[in-house]
Image (cartoon, rainbow, N blue to C red):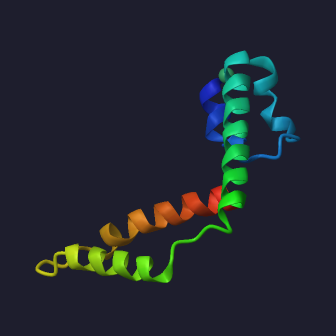
Amino acid sequence: MNCAEFWNQMPELASGANPEHNHAAECPACAALLERQRRLASGLRTMAGDMRSVGAPPRLESNLLEAFRSQLAPAAPRPMRARWTPVFSWAAAVAAVIA
Ligand SMILES: [Zn+2]
């Protein structure tokens, strides 16, 4: 297995006990990068846990939504995919950090 094949399997999402991820044991560069990604994910999970008790006031959320909606251009409807792709991307990123 080469480096590209290793990363195509998304080893950063694996538990670490998968024998198919032995490439990291043989490749110091990938092992270092994988360890860095795991430390980053751990730090983000810790930060997400710390931030659970912190929330913006409801009034701020409504003001932000109102400002966001006022910036939308109502003239030309955009394709549904173009509108939702950024939302889904951010939701997936937040879900990955929290999970
Ligand atoms: Zn490698």
Q: Which quadrant of the view contains residue 85?
A: bottom left
Q: Residue 86 sits in which quadrant? A: bottom left
Q: Which residue is drawn at 72% across and 39% down?
A: 38
The reply, left or right, for residue 78 in relation to residue 99 is left
- Image position, residue 7 (x, y; %): 63, 35
Residue 53 position within the rendered picture, expressed as x and y whole percent measured from the top left: 68, 69
Total numbered circles: 0
Of 76 and 4, the residue lying toward us: 76
Is 42 positioned to the left or the right of 76 in the image? right
Q: In which quarter of the image is residue 39?
A: top right
Q: Which of 28 and 60 is in front in this view?
A: 60
> At x 22% / y 79%, what residue is drawn?
70
User: Please, which residue is most extreme toward the left here?
Assistant: 75
Quarter of the rendered structure image containing ligand 1: top right
Q: Position of residue 18 (x, y in %)?
A: 85, 41
Is 5 left or right of 61, judged from the image as shown? right
- Seen in the picture, residue 2 relative to 66 is either above or below; the reply is above
Q: Quadrant of the N terminus?
A: top right
- In which quadrant of the rendered image does the C terminus lie? bottom right
What's the residue at 11%, 80% (across, down)?
Answer: 75
Residue 81 drawn above or below residue 12: below
Q: Position of residue 23 (x, y in %)?
A: 76, 26
Q: Is residue 1 placed above or below 43 in the rendered structure?
A: above
x 35%, y 79%: residue: 63
